Image (cartoon, helix red, strand yellow):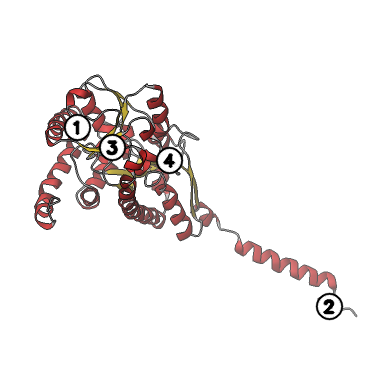
């Protein structure tokens, strides 16, 4: 008599059941599937721009590798999903899960936002980092942005920008009166107070505006970025120091409801990847600028340092603008007061611990 376990049909069935078992074991459970995060991450900056746009892909790649694809952020170029200046609003509405942003672009809706991104005559990069992590900055940022259904994560920082690109050297602030200029954040408010006509444009639109004469001058970013965008072809006087942005901070912003649903472990992974982004971003941005400036003469660019007299006047106007903004918005006032208090204490260490720059 034929035994059942010898039958080819039985053997085939056993193999099929075993294969199905292995397949079921390999399939993610409902809990595992829910823990996977595949987000589109619109960025305010093209990923092709060094130090400015390439940090978001770095953070995304790090997260993808560290979590074996469980947290998979697909960086989207500016304007493909959301206009570059409307990222925070889109994230708050849940139109996109997250974004990589310069919070100063939120100035029209969140008056205190520029303080988290760049402050005229304000902190240097490492000082801002210390304030964010250990001086109450993170708590203030979360409090203000949570009210807009957005969770901000400090994710990148660079050193100072250039003070702008001009067709003639700026030797007096009288030259600012009537100037058509692209300027962002609180520095733009200072330019307006000096009589300039200020336009807020995304980086990709600045060259054409200069070329058409829609603007006479512009600031945007670091020398390596500005040169990549071709500003030197129109305006050959590049001014320093970057008084309006001694630091430039970037944040990953996540829809707050989505952030609250994530596991503590996943939130920690994103926090760690962004901390790595901060370190990498500052190191890269500091490493690349010297070589660019060294080559200015070869491309007809004149690097010009603003006089002490001009800088003192700019600082006085900046302090006036900051005081006015603080008087008009309670959140601005408490963030500004926090930064001033931290800077006052930090000054003891800064003055004594570091060699003078003119040593």
Query: Where on the picture, by quarter, is residue 99?
Result: top left
Closer to viewer: mark 3 or mark 4: 3
Closer to viewer: mark 3 or mark 1: 3
Q: Determine the CA span between mark 1 and mark 2.
A: 83 Å
Q: Are marks 1 and 4 in contact (CB under 8 Å)?
A: no
Please report whichever mark, 3 or 1, sits nearer to the chain's N-terminal start: 3
Secondary structure beneath label 4: loop
Please report whichever mark, 1 or 2, sits nearer to the chain's N-terminal start: 2
Please report whichever mark, 2 or 3, sits nearer to the chain's N-terminal start: 2
In the image, taking residue 302 as reference, residue 28 lies left or right, namely: right
In the image, taking residue 228 as reference, residue 304 lies left or right, namely: left
Q: Which residue is mark 4?
A: 43
Secondary structure beneath label 1: helix
Residue 302's mark?
3
Residue at 28% of width from left, 37% of height from top?
Answer: 302
Q: Few, some or many C-alpha atoms within 10 Å of disc 2 (few <14, some 14-19, many ≥20)?
A: few
Q: Does the image show residue 222? A: no
Q: Position of residue 228 (x, y in %)?
A: 41, 40
Secondary structure beneath label 3: strand
Closer to viewer: mark 2 or mark 3: 3
Residue 330's mark?
1
């Amino acid at each position: 008599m034929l035994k059942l376990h010898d039958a080819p049909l039985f053997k085939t069935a056993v193999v099929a059941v075993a294969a199905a078992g292995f397949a079921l074991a390999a399939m993610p459970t409902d809990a595992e599937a829910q823990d996977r995060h595949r987000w589109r991450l619109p960025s305010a900056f093209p990923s092709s721009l060094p130090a400015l746009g390439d940090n978001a892909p770095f953070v995304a790649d790090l997260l993808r590798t560290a979590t074996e694809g469980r947290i998979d952020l697909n960086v989207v170029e500016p304007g493909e999903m959301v206009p570059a200046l409307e990222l925070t609003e889109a994230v708050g509405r849940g139109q996109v899960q997250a974004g990589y942003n310069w919070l100063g672009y939120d100035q029209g809706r969140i008056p205190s936002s520029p303080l988290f991104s760049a402050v005229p005559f304000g902190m240097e990069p490492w000082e801002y980092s210390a304030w964010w992590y250990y001086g109450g900055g993170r708590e203030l940022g979360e409090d203000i942005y949570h009210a807009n259904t957005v969770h901000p994560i400090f994710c990148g920082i660079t050193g100072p920008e250039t003070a702008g690109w001009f067709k003639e050297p700026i030797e007096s602030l009288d030259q600012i009166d009537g100037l058509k200029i692209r300027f962002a954040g609180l520095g733009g408010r200072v330019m307006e107070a000096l009589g300039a006509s200020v336009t807020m444009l995304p980086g990709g639109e600045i060259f054409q505006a200069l070329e058409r004469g829609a603007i006479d001058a512009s600031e945007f970013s670091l020398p390596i970025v500005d040169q990549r965008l071709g500003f030197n072809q129109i305006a050959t006087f590049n001014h320093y120091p970057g008084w309006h942005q001694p630091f430039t901070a970037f944040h990953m912003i996540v829809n707050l409801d989505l952030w609250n649903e994530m596991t503590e472990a996943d939130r920690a992974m994103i926090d760690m990847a962004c901390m790595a982004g901060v370190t990498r971003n500052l190191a890269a941005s500091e490493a690349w600028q010297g070589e660019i400036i060294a080559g200015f003469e070869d491309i007809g660019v004149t690097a010009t340092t603003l006089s002490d007299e001009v800088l003192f006047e700019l600082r006085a106007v900046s302090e006036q603008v900051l005081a006015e903004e603080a008087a008009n918005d309670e959140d601005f006032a408490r963030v500004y007061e926090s930064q001033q208090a931290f800077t006052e204490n930090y000054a003891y260490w800064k003055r004594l611990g570091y060699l003078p720059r003119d040593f």
